[in-house]
Amino acid sequence: MFKNWNELASRQLDGEVLSRAEALAILRSDDAELLSLVAAGGLLRRAAFGDTVKVNYLVNLKSGLCPEDCHYCSQRLGSTAQILKYSWLSPAETAAQASVGIRAGASRVCLVASGTGPSHRDVERVAELVGKVKTEHPQVEVCVCLGILRDAQAERLRAAGADAYNHNLNTSESRYGEICTTHTFADRVQTVEKVQQAGLSACAGLIVGMGESDEELVDAIFALRDLGADSIPVNFLMPFEGTPLADTWLLTPAQCVRILALARFACPSAEVRMAGGRELHLRTLQSLALHLANSLFLGDYLTSEGQEASADLEMIADAGFRVLGAEDRELADEGVTIRRRGAGTEIPANA
């Protein structure tokens, strides 16, 4: 078992590449080593990002109605999860939701729509939304997540002002067929590559807690490293009722921290984001995890509630960090609450 985590961090700072044996040692370290592991990972985190935390905010442009069968997803084909289902927010509502997140501290807005991938008409629609958000908030980054892209679509989004595109690998190539059969791991890799070729920042991450082995988890994170993902959202499975992975509870808070440590050691200069499910699985260790992750989502997720924005901002401050860019803009009062429409409500298309 590897023990000298500070030495390992020093080697990463000197440009060494994390080996598979070292990666497995991180995942299999015992609880008595957890604080020393986090402290060493924190050296890498602060070397790349100082004491800042990047705050991101999701705007769910289109919810449910997806033809894909991803086993983890509440929006999948055949899901009976009680979620919102609607088709395309209007430009005005999109801009209004984005503004709420920005006033609460977000420096990146993520525009997300369910589905296999966009039509060219969809891309034009989203290009208009990107332009509206960028016109009203030129200092804010806009990330788009629309699924698998066709040729020229990434370039169109870049021309509209998008800064980044999110498309997660989700798990290892060897395990991919067990969580989805309607598209392949290679399809996802190809979209990330198209994004990079278009000059967009590649945001690509994974979902943990789906029954993957340590080896498969290392494979997934090393694949993200090999792709050169600029930001890596680490999602912790939210086992929605009405999906094949309902009642799948395999993670502990300490193991979630170790997974974030692996992402940080494997990709020292990448933005590592503790994303969906952090409240459920990290629980009281969320603030400790900020010493590894330099990014989080504020407020609610696509189809589930997160903790209140005020609690997130307090957690960041209490852990000794500051919100990236906060000094350049006035944030909303600490008591701000971010909530979307209640779960289970059906709203009409184009609402």
Image: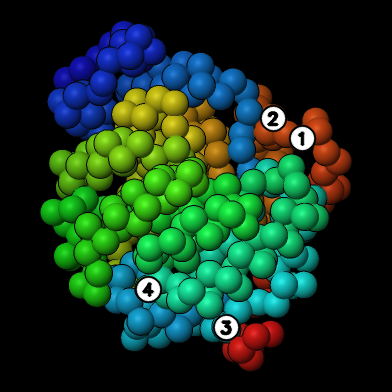
Amino acid at circle 4: Thr
Q: Amino acid at mark 3?
A: Ser
For the point 28% across and 53% down, the residue is 189
Tag 2: Cα neighbours inside 10 Å, few (<14), some, or many (≥20)? some
Judged by depth in the image, the label closer to the viewer, 1 or 4, is 4
Front: mark 1 or 3: 3
Label 2 element class: strand
Q: Which residue is mark 4?
A: 116
Instruction: Choose the circle earlier in sequence order: 1 or 4.
Output: 4
Task: Give the x, y percent position of residue 8.
Answer: 30, 14
Q: How far is disc 1 from disc 2 in space, using C-alphas?
A: 8 Å
CB contact under 8 Å: marks 1 and 2 = yes
The one of 90 and 245 positioned closer to us in this rendering? 90
Residue at the spot of label 1: 326
Residue of label 3: 87
Residue lying at 53% horizontally and 75% vertically, measured from the top left: 122
**Number of the front mark, 1 or 2:** 1
- Judged from the image, the secondary structure of the residue bearing numbered disc 4 is loop
Between circles 4 and 2, the one closer to the viewer is 4
Task: Give the residue number, with chain letter if any, for mark 2.
Answer: 322
- Quarter-wise, where is residue 316 in the image? top right
Q: Is residue 302 left or right of residue 128?
A: left
Q: Provide residue 10's location: percent of width, then percent of height.
A: 36, 9
